[in-house]
Every structure is written in structure tokens, then in C-alpha cells.
Image: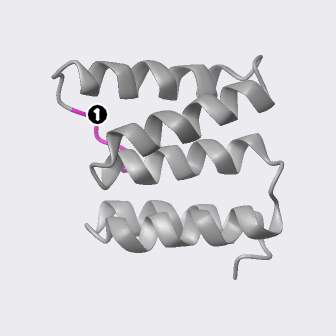
């Protein structure tokens, strides 16, 4: 349900953790249609795109999240993670234990 922010986030993470990264991207995009100015959801899209291997698009989404909320350390951390992956470091495990 894209109208429920937290449900969308949980669904997106489960999609990433089960290898359904395209569905994770679609869920994050659907949530942003409803909550276009939500920096956290912009970061979620960046994470989903990173998991899907779309590094350039992931960086764009993460940069938008930082611009929307520059004080959020999660958004800045996502930019750093994407930069590290772009430089050849293996991505982190985004799935909770």
C-alpha cells in the first residue's frame, strides 16, 4: 500500500532481502508519488536502486534526499555507501539479521 509510508518501506526491504530488487525500486517509486517531498523515501529509493545495481540513479536519489534533509545522517551515509560501491567496494548487507 503506497499510501502507508512504513508499510512501503518494510515491503521494499523485504524485496531487497529476497532478491526482488526491481520490485523494491517500484515500491519506492510508488511511495514517492504519494509522498514526493519525503527525504526518507528518497533515500529508500536510492537504497533500492543501489541494491538493483543502478549506481548512477541511486546516487541521484541519495543526493536528492540529502538536499531535502541535509542534517539526516542516514541520507549522508547512503551517499557515502554509494560512492564506495562506485569506487569498487562491495556493497553492505542491507537486510536485517
Depth check: give the residue in front, 31 or 9: 31
Q: Which residues are magenta?
A: 91-97
Magenta-span inclusion, residue 62: no
State the residue position of label 1. 92
Query: Is 7 located above or below residue 91 in the figure?
Result: below
Residue 23: in sight, yes or no? yes
Q: Is residue 55 above or below residue 49?
A: above
Question: Do we see residue 97 in this rendering?
Answer: no
Residue 21 location, x and y as percent?
34, 65
State how the image is colored: one colour
Mark 1, residues whose alpha carbon is within 10 Å: few (<14), some, or many (≥20)?
A: few
Q: In the picture, residue 71 is in which quadrant? A: top right
Q: Is the residue 22 above or below the residue 40 in the image? A: below
**What is the x, y in percent for residue 46?**
50, 44
Q: Is residue 12 found left or right of 23 in the rendered image? A: right
Residue that appears at 36% across and 61% down: 16
On-image quarter of the N terminus = bottom right
Magenta segment includes 93 = yes
Q: Give residue 2's quadrant in the image.
A: bottom right
**Regarding mark 1 in the picture, which secondary structure is present there?**
loop
Q: Is residue 69 left or right of residue 55?
A: right
Q: Residue at x 68, y 35 (%)?
A: 65
Q: Is residue 77 left or right of residue 82?
A: right
Left/right of residue 90 with respect to residue 75 in the rendered view: left
Instruction: Identify the residue at image location x=65%, y=46%.
Output: 42
Q: Position of residue 25 (x, y in %)?
A: 47, 64
Amino acid at each position: 500500500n503506497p499510501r502507508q509510508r512504513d508499510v512501503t518501506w518494510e515491503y521494499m526491504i523485504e524485496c531487497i532481502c529476497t532478491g526482488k530488487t526491481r520490485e523494491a525500486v517500484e515500491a519506492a517509486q510508488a511511495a514517492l508519488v504519494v509522498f514526493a517531498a519525503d527525504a526518507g523515501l528518497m533515500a529508500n529509493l536510492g537504497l533500492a536502486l543501489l541494491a538493483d545495481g543502478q549506481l548512477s540513479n541511486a546516487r541521484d536519489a541519495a543526493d536528492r534526499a540529502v538536499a531535502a534533509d541535509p542534517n539526516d545522517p542516514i541520507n549522508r551515509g547512503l551517499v557515502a555507501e554509494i560512492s564506495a560501491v562506485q569506487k569498487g567496494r562491495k556493497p553492505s548487507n542491507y537486510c536485517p539479521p
